[in-house]
Amino acid sequence: GENVEQHPSTLSVQEGDSAVIKCTYSDSASNYFPWYKQELGKGPQLIIDIRSNVGEKKDQRIAVTLNKTAKHFSLHITETQPEDSAVYFCAASKASQGAQKLVFGQGTRLTINP
Amino acid sequence: NAGVTQTPKFQVLKTGQSMTLQCAQDMNHEYMSWYRQDPGMGLRLIHYSVGAGITDQGEVPNGYNVSRSTTEDFPLRLLSAAPSQTSVYFCASSPRVGGLGELFFGEGSRLTVL
């Protein structure tokens, strides 16, 4: 089955700098890669996703890149702000399957220092 | 809309006790699921349901039981609590049964088993 590895487990950056979180996946048939953000005391919330037919997707200050050959994808946050502090989870699955096949990474705790 | 509502938010049990974590959603989603979140292990699927009367096991189902008598409710039962079940539990729903679909999470239930 699918296995998703996420790095780093913790990341601390200065406000205004960029943050990058990386994930690798094992199943070359996976083609759907969402990212979830979990704020303190809350449940995870979808912030961006990408399908394997594109290499990059942007939404304001966040972007996700995908390298299908290397089987890795990354979340990029530019001009970080205090509200970006949270735990971020990557995930992978086949788009044709249901949410029950979504496999999550271990999570990255991002801290933005003022 | 309230979205996904979980109760209780906190619970302390003694080993061997049983309890039920409640989950309700008001979005008319067919798909509902339960995850547990442990440090360094991401989100792991316990059980899921693709509609009323239909449930199935996820990655870590042992020690848990579920039922789905209505579209709205999906309770998780701990039959005989063990310290290994100390975790944060999240209920999630999705509008899609098959294929791509955003997961909507509740705010979590923190369970401690002594």
Image: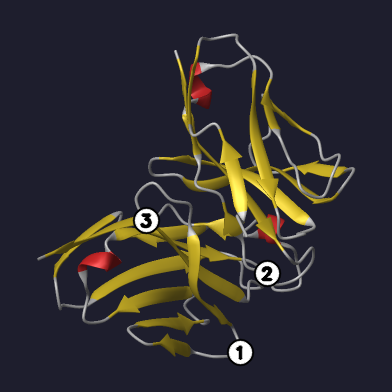
**Quadrant of the rendering where the N terminus of chain B is positioned:** bottom right
- Residue labelled with disc 1: A53
The reply to whether residue B9 is in sight is yes
Chain letter for the residue marked with disc 2 in the picture: B
As helix, strand or loop, the secondary structure at mark 3 comes to loop
Circles 1 and 3, Cβ within 8 Å, touching? The answer is no
- Residue labelled with disc 2: B101
**Residue type, numbered disc 2:** Gly
Looking at the picture, tell me which residue is in the foreground, B52 or A2: B52
For marks 1 and 3, the one nearer the N-term is: 3
Q: Residue at x 77, y 48 (%)?
A: B72
- Residue labelled with disc 3: A39
Q: Residues within 10 Å of mark 3 (few under 14, many from 20)?
A: some
Q: Would you say A15 lies left or right of A27 here?
A: left
Q: Which mark is residue B28?
A: none
- Asked if both marks, 1 and 3, belong to the same chain, the answer given is yes
Q: Position of residue B48 (x, y in %)?
A: 73, 46
Q: Residue at x 60, y 46 (%)?
A: B5
Chain letter for the residue marked with disc 1 in the picture: A
Real-space Cα separation, disc 1 to disc 3, in angstroms? 30 Å
Q: Position of residue B110 (x, y in %)?
A: 46, 32
Real-space Cα separation, disc 1 to disc 2, in angstroms? 17 Å
Of badges 1 and 2, the one in the foreground is 2
Q: Position of residue A16 (x, y in %)?
A: 15, 78
**Residue type, numbered disc 3:** Glu
Q: Residue at x 52, y 56 (%)?
A: A104
As helix, strand or loop, the secondary structure at mark 1 comes to loop
Q: Residues within 10 Å of mark 2 (few under 14, many from 20)?
A: some
Q: Position of residue B79 (x, y in %)?
A: 69, 18
Circles 3 and 2, Cβ within 8 Å, touching? The answer is no
**Residue type, numbered disc 1:** Asn
